[in-house]
Amino acid sequence: MSHADTVAEIRDLRVEIDGRAIVDGVDLQVLPGKVTALVGASGSGKTTTGLALLGEYPPGARVTGDVRLTEGGLVGYVPQHPAAVLNPARRVGALLHDIARPQARHLPRTERRTAARARVLQAMLDAQLPDAEALLRRHPHQLSGGQQQRVVLAQALLLGARVIVADEPTTGQDALTKSRIVDQLAAVAARGIAVVLLSHDLDVVQALADEVLVMRAGRVVESGPVERLWLSPRHEWTRRLLEAHDAAPREEASAGQPVLEVRNMTAVHDRTTVLRAPHLTLNSGECLAVVGRSGSGKTTLARCLAGLHRDHDGEVLLDGTALPHSLRHRSRAQLAAVQYVFQDARAAFDEHRPVVAQVARTAVRLRGAAEQAATDEALTTLARLGLTDDMAHRRPAELSGGELQRAALARALLAHPRVLICDEITSGLDTVTRRGILDLLAGLVRDRGGLSLVLITHDQETARLAHRVVVVDAGELVEQGSARWVLEAGTGLRT
């Protein structure tokens, strides 16, 4: 394919913040109908490079190099955390119809509404959003993370984008939905749309990409066709990524007495029952994985445990004592005992304060720790999670999604919790970092005298860390058992 066929091109891109290069000399050629994947560790510069195609850069960045789009080369963006770009006050139908209506202006007035609605429904179908009529009536916060992501993809398709930058599009997706998203992006490329895929999920990259650029510390260290990179990687970092991807987390021995118990729970959204959990226990020192499709009720269960979703009947007991349904009514000790780490870490941080101050604040607020002692503990915990002192003193916008996810984990750990609920916290991490986080979590369960872990996950390898697995489907707990039995013999993630 000739140089003239490119839809977008980046030449010698360099992006500096406070004299530090976060992207350094990157070249990228985007071709119609092709999928180009950027892979690498959190903070390697993938998202900054992808956003450059939209002309967006971090605040205060100094940018050199060229970014060129062909005439009419509209770029759509599907972000890692879709809630950040969806207006929470408007229903999904209104968001999508706002895009579709102007495109129907050439039609007679009587036909515009029907045509716009048909385009919206087709875009939702193309973005793998079933039950479109029901979803159109919901607000973004009433959707799962996976559903939010597909709404944003539908917006990009409605806009007629020539290039789609997909930033971790399968993050937070179950195995079946992930497969469908891969098929959909392949179908998008087959229609001649260029796809720039930013991903830590090497299975998805292998299945979808035509070309791969491997990034580290802002530079492209290796590039080439996906088949060649997988069969004969030339750079040491590429080999490390692939080796870590092939390594499976270990399974620890289970033990302990019940620390958290669910009895007769029925949770609702706008009077619609979304989850039934007759009985569920979490033992001291145990890791419990909750798996199932996007929208199945996994996160609702986790939010009920943490007091973030109060619209439920039944009880959540900590050491045999019922917890208030709302965290607003929980004591400091109860808040500290059950900590929640969100999938969308960026939305959980104050963008104006250094990360270390926000991490340390947990120890001050929930444990009564002194300011200096809390700061020292925060720095130590962040360092254990791979965040340097320099990173710790940055503001959230200066960290990658993966780095901020680790900071969110550190903040929860400073409460010295009894129960740690992790909602897809490894889904935005590269394979090397993800393996390190899983090893760290296994070590915490093993070493921290009774810490219990609830993993909300779509990833089978992450679920293998658990002692037990609960499968949620259509709001029902359909299966429980040992991780080995459920993942290998039971329903597992093959729902």
Image (cartoon, grey):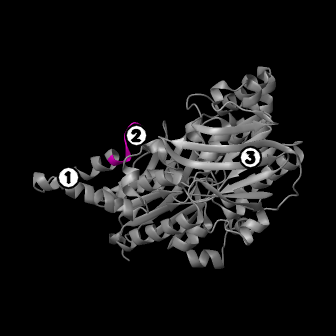
Q: Which residue is drawn at 58% across and 57% down?
A: 219
Per the image, the residue denoted by label 3 is: 386
Between label 1 and label 2, give the one nearer the viewer. Answer: 1
Callouts 1 and 2 close, C-beta under 8 Å = no
**Front residue of 46 and 26:** 46
Q: What residue type is labelled 1?
A: Arg
Per the image, the residue denoted by label 2 is: 87
Instruction: Assign the C terminus to one quadrant of the image.
Output: bottom right
Spatial separation of the CA atoms under disc 3 and disc 2: 34 Å
Residue 352, quarter of picture: top right
Q: Is mark 1 on a helix, strand or loop?
A: helix
Spatial separation of the CA atoms under disc 1 and disc 3: 53 Å
Instruction: Using the image, determine if residue 190 lies above or below residue 417.
Output: below
Q: Is mark 3 on a helix, strand or loop?
A: loop
Per the image, the residue denoted by label 1 is: 113
**Front residue of 196 and 78:** 78
Residue 421, quarter of picture: top right
Residue 478 percent location from the top left of the image: 65, 60
326 left or right of 106? right
Evaluate whether residue 132 shows in this view: yes
Label 1 crowd bin: few (<14), some (14–19), many (20+), radius 10 Å: some
Instruction: Assign the N terminus to one quadrant of the image.
Output: bottom left
Evaluate whether residue 225 shows in this view: no
Point out the stretch of residues depicted in magenta: 89-93
Instruction: Using the image, determine if residue 376 lies above or below residue 63.
Output: above
Q: What residue type is labelled 3?
A: Gly
Q: Which residue is drawn at 66% across and 74% down?
A: 233
